[in-house]
């Protein structure tokens, strides 16, 4: 416990020194510190990737299925996935923690991931107008498994509160869908995006 506390304070000092050395503007500095503190409070300083890296492949897949169980249980698109398929998907998911004000997608950038909201709320902004509010259980990104070429985001997606997102990247998802063809058909039929950022309106 003492070692963890010492690491926490050392990390905060390093971040403060960095912000001071590079004269990061006050508003951005406050956002960085807020993010670092909130992320630490959620993870308790535990590096999930480091823990997973020391586990055998089979055990790592089991842990990843457990960590992504909310996504798998809440969305009908995963209902027909075999154990092997879920394990292949689970190891490809990444958990992202966002602080209020963070931009998850910038308008014009490549849509290379699919995001599942596990907690928190976000706003979708197009032409300076809020066109949608996203919350727990919502899915946003692109239906790239149905499209021949990648697209560009037509809106900004910004966190309104602290958010936890489970994210899978385009290449990783396509690789799993290509291998598990029966699941791919079911997934394509049943996964409904709350907000498709390829389109001009959600």
Image (tube, grey):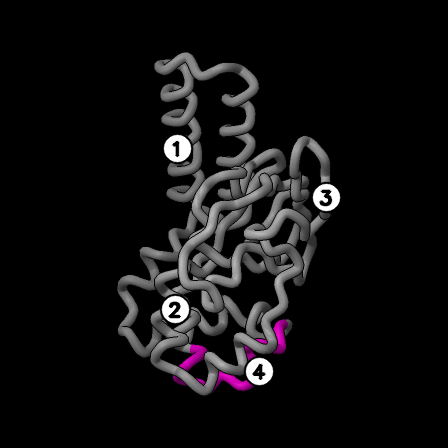
> Mark 4 = which residue?
79
> Mark 2 = which residue?
174
- Per the model, the C-alpha gap separating discs 2 and 1 is 37 Å
- Per the model, the C-alpha gap separating discs 1 and 4 is 41 Å
The tag on residue 186 is none
Q: Earlier in the sequence, mark 1 or mark 4?
A: 1
Q: Earlier in the sequence, mark 3 or mark 2?
A: 3
User: Hey, which quadrant is residue 176 in on the image?
Assistant: bottom left
Front-most of 201 and 158?
A: 201
> Mark 1 = which residue?
11
- Per the model, the C-alpha gap separating discs 1 and 3 is 38 Å
Give SS at disc 2: helix
- Per the model, the C-alpha gap separating discs 4 and 2 is 18 Å
Q: Nearer the viewer, mark 3 or mark 4?
A: 3
Contact flag, marks 2 and 1 (Cβ < 8 Å): no
Answer with left or right where residue 143 lies relative to residue 195: left
78 within the magenta span: yes
Residue under the image location 52 percent in, 57 percent down: 142
> Mark 3 = which residue?
131
Residue 136 position within the rendered picture, expressed as x and y whole percent measured from the top left:
68, 58
Residue under the image location 59 percent in, 69 percent down: 70
Residue under the image location 43 percent in, 46 percent down: 110
Answer with left or right where residue 140 lies relative to residue 171: right
Residue 174 position within the rendered picture, expressed as x and y whole percent measured from the top left:
38, 68
Q: Which residues are magenta?
A: 75-86
Residue under the image location 68 percent in, 48 percent down: 121
Q: Residues within 10 Å of mark 1 (few under 14, many from 20)?
A: some
Q: Residues within 10 Å of mark 2 (few under 14, many from 20)?
A: some
Q: Residues within 10 Å of mark 4 (few under 14, many from 20)?
A: some
Residue 66 position within the rendered picture, expressed as x and y whole percent measured from the top left:
49, 72
Front-most of 118 and 39?
A: 118
């Amino acid at each position: 416990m003492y070692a963890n506390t010492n690491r926490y304070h050392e990390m905060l000092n390093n971040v403060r020194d960095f912000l001071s050395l590079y004269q990061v503007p006050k508003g951005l500095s406050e956002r960085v510190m807020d993010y670092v503190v909130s992320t630490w409070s959620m993870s308790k300083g535990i590096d999930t990737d480091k823990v997973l890296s020391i586990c055998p492949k089979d055990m790592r897949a089991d842990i990843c299925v457990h960590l992504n169980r909310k996504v798998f249980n809440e969305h009908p698109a995963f209902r027909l996935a075999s154990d092997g398929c879920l394990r292949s998907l689970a190891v490809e998911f990444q958990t992202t923690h966002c602080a209020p004000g963070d931009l998850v997608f910038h308008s014009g950038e490549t849509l290379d991931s699919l995001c599942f909201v596990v907690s928190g709320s976000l706003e979708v902004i197009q032409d300076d107008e809020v066109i949608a509010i996203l919350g727990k259980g919502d899915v946003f990104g692109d239906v790239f498994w149905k499209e021949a070429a990648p697209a560009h985001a037509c809106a900004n997606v910004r966190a309104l509160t602290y958010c936890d997102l489970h994210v899978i990247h385009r290449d990783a998802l396509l690789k799993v869908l290509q291998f598990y063809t029966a699941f791919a058909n079911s997934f394509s039929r049943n996964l409904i995006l709350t907000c498709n950022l390829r389109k001009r309106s959600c």
